[in-house]
Image (cartoon, rainbow, N blue to C red):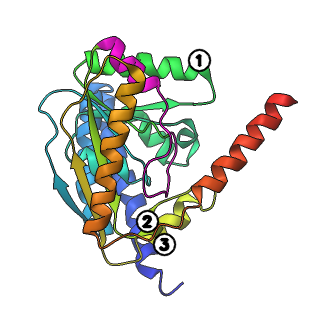
Amino acid sequence: MKKNLRGYFRFFLFIVLVLFYLTRYLIGALFKGRDLKRGLNYRLKFAHAIRKVIGVDIEVKGSPPDHPALYVGNHRTYYDPGGVSLDVPMSVVVAKAEIRDWPLIGYATDFIGIIFVDRNNPDSRKATRVAMADALERGFSVLIYPEGTTGDRPTTLPFSPGTFAMAVKMGVPIVPIAMEYKHPADAWISRTQSFASHYIQTYSKKRTPVKIRYGEPMFDENVETFMAKVKAWIDENLLEIQAEFGGVAWESKVDDILKQKALEQAKKAAS
């Protein structure tokens, strides 16, 4: 308890900041109505504030393009979109549907351009692709994590091809992102630890070093080739960042969890 005191205090400040910016948005909405750009501006202010509160040090290499784009990155933890939003503020984020049910956070995400997807539901996946295309056509960028979950392998988990098929259909390039953390325990595997517990543990340490790399826009007319090129770029850059950190001793838990999930789905399909 004592060693996590900083983490508890930072979690309290996290809740306070969410309430503060959510209240400001809702008060404005009474007079101006709901507006995605205003919601994203509040998200940006929150991202700057929370970065200072929790002690995240970010080193950025490469620059996002100055026009709407489709961003694809590896997924380590819930902080990933927050770090990227500092560089790409006018972006909507594709997130797993379970987040919508989180207390307070799920409600707040309704105003900041989150597109929820149930990856086990074909109709939900189709609706997500439609929403992504609509966001791009309206001048917003889209950030998506094709692994579908957070992982603690040195490199990425298998990608879902849906994003790449949509990009090929629309003729939209993809900007790859590699985002890495110095400390292996910063990776969050939701089936082994709750959000609050991991948050308190992670941000009990004084500083959290993070490195983000943005690649040049990539495109290929073949979905499988396109996906392989983006994945290879991200994996290569993750390994390079890990080397810069002095080597990261990953002890992966996610592989066992994915195997168990596959067994559960197979039993469900057979019943």
Question: Disc 1 to disc 2, how far (Cα)?
Answer: 33 Å
Dot 1 or dot 2, earlier in sequence: 1
Picture coordinates of residue 187, whole percent (x, y): 46, 61
The residue carrying mark 1 is 123
Q: Main secondary structure of the magenta part?
A: loop
Q: Which residues are magenta?
A: 148-170
- The C terminus appears in which quarter of the rendering? top right
- x and y, in percent, of residue 34 in the image: 33, 27
What crowding class fits label 2: few (fewer than 14 Cα within 10 Å), some (14-19), or many (20 or more)?
A: many
Residue 27: image quadrant is top left
Q: Secondary structure at mark 3?
A: helix
Q: Are marks 1 and 2 in contact (CB under 8 Å)?
A: no
Query: Measured from the top left, where is residue 44 in percent x and y?
Result: 24, 46
Residue type, mark 2 in image: Asp
Q: Say what amino acid the circle numbered 3 marks.
A: Gln
Tell me if residue 165 is in the magenta stretch.
yes
Q: In the drawing, what numbered circle is on residue 186?
A: 2
Quadrant in which residue 137 is drawn: top left
> In the visual, does 58 lie left or right of 254?
left
In the image, residue 23 lies in the stretch drawn in magenta: no
- On screen, residue 213 above or below 127: below
Q: Nearer the viewer, residue 90 or 59?
A: 59
Q: Is residue 249 above or below residue 233?
A: below
What is the CA distance from the residue labelled 1 to the residue labelled 3? 37 Å
Q: Secondary structure at mark 2?
A: helix
Residue 70 shows in this picture: yes
Question: How many tags in the picture?
Answer: 3
Which mark, by number, is residue 201? 3
Q: Is residue 110 left or right of residue 121?
A: left
Three-letter residue code for mark 1: Asp
Does label 3 or label 2 sit earlier along the sequence? 2
